[in-house]
Amino acid sequence: MTGSPPQSGTGRPFYLTTPIYYINARPHLGHAYTTIVADAMCRYRRLAGDDVHFLTGTDEHGDKIAQAAHQAGESPRALADRNSAAFREQWKLLDIRYDDFIRTTEARHAGVVQAILRRLWDGGEIYFGQYGGQYCFGCERFYTDREGVDGKCPDHQTPLVYLEEENYFFRMSKYQDWLRRELEENPTRVRPERYRNELLGFLREPLQDLSISRPKTRLEWGIPLPFDDRFVTYVWFDALLNYVSALGGPGEPRFERYWPTVQHLIGKDILKPHGIYWPCMLKAAGIPLFQHLNVHGYWTLGGGKISKSVGNVVEALALAETYGRDAFRYFVLREMPFGQDANFSADALLERLNADLANDLGNLVSRVTTLHRTLSRDAAVPAAPVADDREMLRRAIAATRAHVDAALAEFAFHRALTEIWSFIGALNGYVDREQPWVLERDPRKGERFLQVLDTLTLGLAFLGIILEPFVPDAARRIREAIGYGEEPRLGDATLDGLSDRTYRVTRLGGLFPRIDLGGRRRPDGRPATASRPEPAVAVRPRSPARDASPDAPTTPEPRDAPAKPRVTIDEFRRLDLRVALVLDAEPVPKSKKLLKLTVRLGEETRTIVAGIAEHYAPAALRGRTVVIVANLEPATLMGVPSEGMVLAGSAGPVLSLLTPDRDLAPGAVVR
């Protein structure tokens, strides 16, 4: 279990499994995506009050492990211990909150595997025989002539090797007609539908019995057969039973509670073992079938599947460290329509981060919390929007919840997030229409100003709950910023549930800092420079030089730029640095780099022209507090008067406006 232990619910049981990951190499983007999907689903079901059991783990037996260990000059056990630990560490750093992590080398798993093998042997479901065929060591299975491609494995593109040996076989062909009827009569058993149809296509050809053992003369690294210790169990027969062994097996209380609700989550590359072998194994063992087999597509890179076997892996942890784990999590959930393939690129990730997270969500949170603390100066916020606003918000919350519920029932995370971002867009549109910064300055409209802020606060409270499964760190920070101190519950995410409380708002800026890399990329598509602001940055004014062309290039100062001449304390005191509130921002006509800012210092309002249009959208600035040089000689730029200079930090192409980390009133002195 990683992170804070999830609380067991008293509601409906819900059991979700990821595949157990093969530990012949370290985790990559494909593993991370599957596990993030499972984590998001389980967080949502916990949010709804369900009693969730989330299982993941590692698959540690078989030819590939033995071969990888031999090549590394170590024992299979040592390799398994090291690489299994790498998966657990990866999930810890990504804040994956599983309930159980199973390893197929554990005694609890081996005991259940041997018990089920014994049951099948005693029931006549297993027999001894001889088999020869084309074998892939990467997949650890035999391929028929029809399945191979030019004598190669269709997945690994490596030559198939002919093997002939005596083994034990499971009478899988006995269940072909039953499985075909099961899939035809239960169209949601495997979803999306295209994968059910693919399985039905497999079943049009005669189903072969399954070799479920390997002789110890060839492979010793596995679970011994309970009825013949000359053989170990075939890795797929061993691995699939983890979903049962993790609950203790039939008859155990946990198994009886959770198994009737089990849903599996897999990638399409392991569809046949999970969609053909596994249901036949369950049927033969007298264990009820899973509720749903949920199948996702491949992540591709340059048109090819991302795979450790192919060697084009994308390191998930490196991406999360670079861009933030919430941003990485949001990208993979939003970018891949569940069941389809999706292409990974750093450009697409940055576009999602800047457009959806920084501009839409981060900007909304910053605007609303800044308006509360610097305009209303009221710590306690009554939740009392007027009737029209209340009805608008009630409908929007109810519709968003209904759409998210429907989407997640089908694992359609991209649809769920699209609906939530529609809600965010509606709130941003409401801010633009009502212009609360204008209402606050008009004494006749002070009541309307507070009504608008109350409506927006309730909207943020809803986002602090509904975003929990998708961007949990950001959701928690939103709740903290508005004083929502309770554990989030989906049942509270209604207008009435959100209204029956008092909110104490503190400013929250920079929820998702915007990233600008200046278009530079490495050949592999990764950023050419660190993409998040670094601690050591150059601080400089962000208005164009008085003697420069307004659209001249503004190259950031390097971090190792030569030191400037020292100044005396008296010279420094001549600068009047002040906190300013941005009331409005708009592009300067005919300029690509300039924005016209309307800012407030105490009771005074000023106009400042700043060369930040390539780094900040106007909407992202409204309601923010910045630091300005207030006693700069006025100038006119592109026909617009400028009465000050905005300060920013820069490191390479990354630029970040300076802003106080605590609430300071407009006009406060910076010293």
Image (cartoon, rainbow, N blue to C red):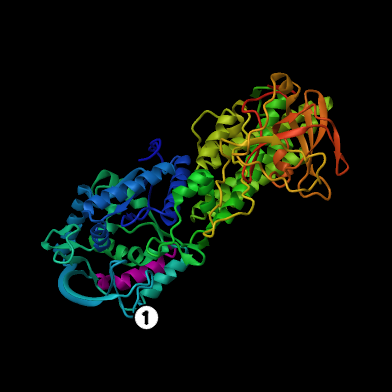
The image quarter containing residue 465 is top right
Above or below for 264 versus 396? below
Q: Secondary structure at mark 1?
A: loop
Horizontal side of residue 483 vs 171, given as left or right: right
Helix, strand or loop: magenta stretch: helix
Query: Is-magenta flag for residue 169?
Result: no
Q: Nearer the viewer, residue 497 or 22?
A: 22
Horizontal side of residue 540 vs 118, given as left or right: right
Image x and y of residue 519, in percent: 63, 54
Which residue occupies 51% across, 38% down? 473
Q: Which residue is mark 1?
A: 150
Query: Is-magenta flag for residue 173?
Result: yes
Which residue occupies 82% across, 45% down? 588
Above or below for 376 versus 532? above
Q: Nearer the viewer, residue 337 or 252?
A: 337
Quadrant occupied by the N terminus: top left
Indicate the amino acid at tag 1. Asp
Q: Nearer the viewer, residue 62 or 108?
A: 62
Q: Nearer the viewer, residue 335 or 294?
A: 335
Horizontal side of residue 646 vs 348, given as left or right: right
The image quarter containing residue 88 is top left
Residue 180 visible in the snapshot: yes
Quadrant occupied by the C terminus: top right
Image x and y of residue 635, in percent: 85, 35
Q: Which residues are magenta?
A: 172-190
Residue 435 visible in the snapshot: no
Above or below for 154 versus 496? below
Image x and y of residue 108, in percent: 21, 48
Image x and y of residue 386, in percent: 73, 33
